[in-house]
Image (spheres, rainbow, N blue to C red):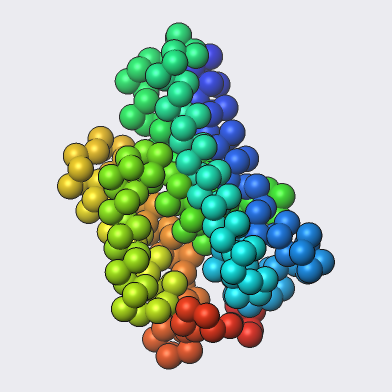
């Protein structure tokens, strides 16, 4: 039993470290020699990179941040599907996969390499959702796409997507731990957008293509 707990902790820790990879921060340092956290919204996520560094760096950061989330979940899945640790009960899969997903999301927003700062976990969340259930991931991205087409605000679209994930988990009959993950993860992502919500209410939230000058 103890060895299984150690293995489980190790899986979540690996997921956290994958999520912690500071993609946006490294893009700022490598491309312009800046700390991206000192510009725009202060986030290391793809949206702030897009505004500060441009479309290509923003797209690359978006892809890598989603990939690290998907990779974290895929590793957790593979450990069970390939029976890499025979002592690990298969019943644990429904719990360890969402925990790995949560670890990746937490790592992105609270990176150990950035003194526990980071992004708002949107791209990484998309990655983990696609790896957990491609149907849920695609449906969540569809909500994001529709809302951004209407609002032209990445933050509002991200919040809508995060809020919808739980619904899609239920629609596609995902296990209860995955539903709980969607609820908690959605609340966490929305909470990470607190400053954006305040700017939306104040009418100062930038739309797609506009820059945010002040750091929050």
View extreme (front): residue = 56
Q: Count the marks.
A: 0
Residue 196 horizontal side relative to residue 14, left or right: left
Q: Position of residue 106 (x, y in %)?
A: 53, 49
Dividing the picture into quadrants, the one containing residue 33 is bottom right
Residue drawn at x 52%, y 80% is 209
Dividing the picture into quadrants, the one containing residue 9 is top right
Residue 79 horizontal side relative to residue 40, left or right: left
Residue drawn at x 51%, y 50% is 66
View extreme (bottom): residue = 203
Q: Position of residue 5 (x, y in %)?
A: 50, 21
Most foreground residue, 49 or 187: 49
Residue drawn at x 56%, y 61% is 59
Most foreground residue, 57 or 23: 57
Task: Please indicate, yes or no, whether residue 105 appears anywhere in the rendered image.
Answer: no
View extreme (top): residue = 86
Q: Position of residue 57 (x, y in %)?
A: 64, 63
- Image height of 31 relative to 40, above or below: above
- Image height of 170 relative to 33, above or below: above
Residue drawn at x 40%, y 79% is 152
- Image height of 54 relative to 59, above or below: below
Q: Position of residue 158 (x, y in %)?
A: 40, 65
Dividing the picture into quadrants, the one containing residue 115 is bottom right
């Amino acid at each position: 039993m103890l060895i299984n707990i150690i293995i489980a902790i190790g899986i979540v820790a690996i997921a956290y470290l994958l999520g912690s990879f500071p993609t946006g921060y490294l893009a700022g340092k490598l491309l312009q020699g800046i700390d991206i956290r000192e510009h725009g919204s202060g986030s290391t996520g793809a949206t702030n990179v897009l505004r500060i560094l441009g479309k290509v760096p923003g797209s690359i950061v978006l892809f890598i941040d989603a990939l690290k989330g998907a990779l974290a979940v895929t590793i957790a899945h593979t450990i069970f599907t390939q029976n890499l640790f025979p002592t690990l009960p298969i019943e644990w899969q429904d719990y360890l996969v969402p925990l790995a997903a949560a670890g990746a999301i937490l790592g992105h927003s609270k990176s150990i390499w950035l003194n526990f700062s980071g992004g708002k976990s949107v791209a990484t969340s998309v990655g983990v959702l696609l790896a957990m259930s491609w149907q849920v991931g695609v449906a969540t991205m569809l909500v994001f796409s529709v809302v951004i087409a209407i609002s032209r605000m990445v933050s509002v679209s991200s919040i809508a997507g995060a809020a919808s994930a739980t619904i899609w988990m239920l629609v596609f009959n995902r296990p209860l731990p995955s539903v709980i993950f969607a609820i908690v993860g959605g609340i966490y992502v929305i909470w990470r957008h607190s400053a954006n919500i305040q700017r939306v209410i104040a009418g100062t939230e930038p739309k797609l293509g506009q820059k945010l000058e002040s750091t929050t």
